[in-house]
Amino acid sequence: MKQAKQLEAKILEVMPGAEGVRVFGSRTRGVSTSDIDVVVKGSTDGSTSAYRTAAKKVQAFAKELGIPKPDGRPRVDINLSPSYRAFLRWSSETGDPSRGLPRLKRME
């Protein structure tokens, strides 16, 4: 999906501390055309104004790409984690066990 690769480039460009991006969720299973769930690996601090500004830029870019906005939710669901392994560990502790662990995929 060309959109995803463009979105990845934008996230890496504007997100302070971002080192990598992976997509997960319904888009990776081919069952949804709505929002995109991503995990951003790195030292990004989600409580800073720099992060909030970057997140707004990512959402605006997603709109330009034509990514739909689900009711009351952002176009890109951004999850921050110091590593992909830490994100998977967190998901296993907080997620719905019946759904299993998310499959993190490179953005294509």
Image (cartoon, helix red, strand yellow):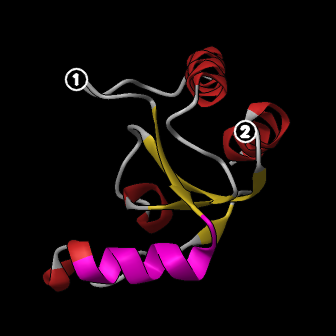
Closest to the observer, 48 or 31? 48
Q: Quadrant of residue 10?
A: top right
Q: Position of residue 103 (x, y in %)?
A: 48, 77
- Counting residues from the start of the chain, the first of labels 1 and 2 encountered is 2
- Residue with the mark numbered 1: 71
**In the depicted structure, whether residue 57 falls above or below residue 27:** above
**In the depicted structure, whether residue 99 falls above or below residue 65:** below
Residue 106 appears in the figure: yes
Q: Secondary structure at mark 2?
A: helix
The residue that appears at 40% across and 61% down in the rendered structure is 25
The residue that appears at 48% across and 72% down in the rendered structure is 87
The quarter of the picture where the C terminus appears is bottom right
In the visual, does 92 lie left or right of 11? left
Question: Any magenta on residue 86?
Answer: yes
- Residue with the mark numbered 2: 11
- Circle 2 packing at 10 Å, graded few (<14), some (14-19), many (20+), is many
Q: Position of residue 79 (x, y in %)?
A: 48, 52
Question: Label 2 amino acid?
Answer: Ile
**Label 1 to label 2: alpha-carbon separation:** 23 Å
Question: Any magenta on residue 26?
Answer: no
Give, as a single range, the part of the protein colored magenta.
82-93
**In the depicted structure, whether residue 66 falls above or below residue 80:** above
The residue that appears at 59% across and 25% down in the rendered structure is 62
